[in-house]
């Protein structure tokens, strides 16, 4: 990814927050010479700073897990809030008109090697951890034990557990931090007032706070 | 992409609407043996059904445009609304408890060959078209002519126009359409009431309407 220094996000706790808030990763692989992507909710297991793992599962019918034996490096793309930024929102436009549109976004690319698991107990643990994470914010969280054991066994047979051992991370935070303060705040205000897309309000808060995902 | 028949989105007008509403594509390439992705706002030029083009631009400093000479197939991922679906939202859970969580999403993968343009007039047209599209919904749309000509010329020098001639499309709409009606509507209602993420409300409307992006 083209990632100029001023857009690089080096704070791995902020990158971890992006993954937690936008867990649907695009697992990018090369299969038979073709670029492929499978959209899979991932859970970050451990600390990104010290070799964490992304865990998830896929349908047994999905050929992607067979790549684990190829020992190739995969990439998982997590796309966070993003929005078009109109130059009309920059107060400096009124002064010199030397402004152009841009597009803001926060994204993380996590690289790693894939391992798979067919072991029922390991798969149950993966499903249990993912469920606990996804249901965590709910008043009455659903848990795997809420379903009949025989049914869960049958469902586990249809999936394969996957783990991505993280080898490297690229993160880009393009949130108007390269603009002077009045223009940056103008962009946040403009976005918040026009809310042209579902994630635009979120991006507005990030621009304003110059911060991460959860805190904004 | 693993894409079972019942999740395949074959209506290219609906796929075009996803691209229009979520224009930030992840342009996936292989560079020096490494998978790479650059996040670029794209405009769909023409009709997906009959060999359209995705147009955009990148910084001249971004090495991705040099791939055009390699004549390799690239993939652009457009990720639309997505959300975790709790099995607690299915009325059928109360009856037999044979339910598990899932994750809904609508995504499009557009494959094609990259061509680049260094011609100032072509680049101006690309920038003008993209701007008109992005500013289209605004009360007082900003236009390229609002900036001083000398300034625009300088900005155009720093970018390269790119075009992706579409060769094939994969689209997956996983919006609970494989559930019985009461569970599908329960998921929509649950999502709408808990709104756990910025795009969840959007997904709730899509599930309810069994439809596309713009119409939902």
Image (cartoon, coloured by chain):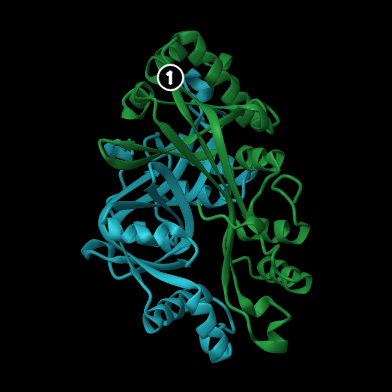
Chain colours: A cyan, B green
Which of the 4 image quadrants contains residue A13? bottom left
Tell me if mark 1 has few (under 14), some (14-19) or many (20+) residues whose alpha carbon lies within 10 angstroms of its own. Answer: many
Query: For this rendering, which residue is in front, B45 or A186?
Result: B45
Q: Say what secondary structure mark 1 lies in.
A: strand
Q: Where does residue A80 sit, x and y in percent of width and height?
A: 47, 51
Q: Where does residue A146 sit, x and y in percent of width and height?
A: 57, 89
Residue located 73% across and 88% down the image: B95
Q: Where does residue B126 sit, x and y in percent of width and height?
A: 54, 19
Asked whether residue A167 is in view, the answer is: yes
Query: For this rendering, which residue is in front, B71 or A41?
Result: B71
Residue located 51% across and 12% down the image: B122
**Does residue B85 sit above or below B26 in this rendering?**
below
B50 lies left or right of A164? right
Circle 1 is placed at which residue position?
A: B116
Residue located 71% across and 38% down the image: B13
Q: Where does residue A11 sit, x and y in percent of width and height?
A: 29, 55
User: On what subunit does the disc labeled 1 rest?
Assistant: B
Asked whether residue A22 is in view, the answer is: no
């Amino acid at each position: 990814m083209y990632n100029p220094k001023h857009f690089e996000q080096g704070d791995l706790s902020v990158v971890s927050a992006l993954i937690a808030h936008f867990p649907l990763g695009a697992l990018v692989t090369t299969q038979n010479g073709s670029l492929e992507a499978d959209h899979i909710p991932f859970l970050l297991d451990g600390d990104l700073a010290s070799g964490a793992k992304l865990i998830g599962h896929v349908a047994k019918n999905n050929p992607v897990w067979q790549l684990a034996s190829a020992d190739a490096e995969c990439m998982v793309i997590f796309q966070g809030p993003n929005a078009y930024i109109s130059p009309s929102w920059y107060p400096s436009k009124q002064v010199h008109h030397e402004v152009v549109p841009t597009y803001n976004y926060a994204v993380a690319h996590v690289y790693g090697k894939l391992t798979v698991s067919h072991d029922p107990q390991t798969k149950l643990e993966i499903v249990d951890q993912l469920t606990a994470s996804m249901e965590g914010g709910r008043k009455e969280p659903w848990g795997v034990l809420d379903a009949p054991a025989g049914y869960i066994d049958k469902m586990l047979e249809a999936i394969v557990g996957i783990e991505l051992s993280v080898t490297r991370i690229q993160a880009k935070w393009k949130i108007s931090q390269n603009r002077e303060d009045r223009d940056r705040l103008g962009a946040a205000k403009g976005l918040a007032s026009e809310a042209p897309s579902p994630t635009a309000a979120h991006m507005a808060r990030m621009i304003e706070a110059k911060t991460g995902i959860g805190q904004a």
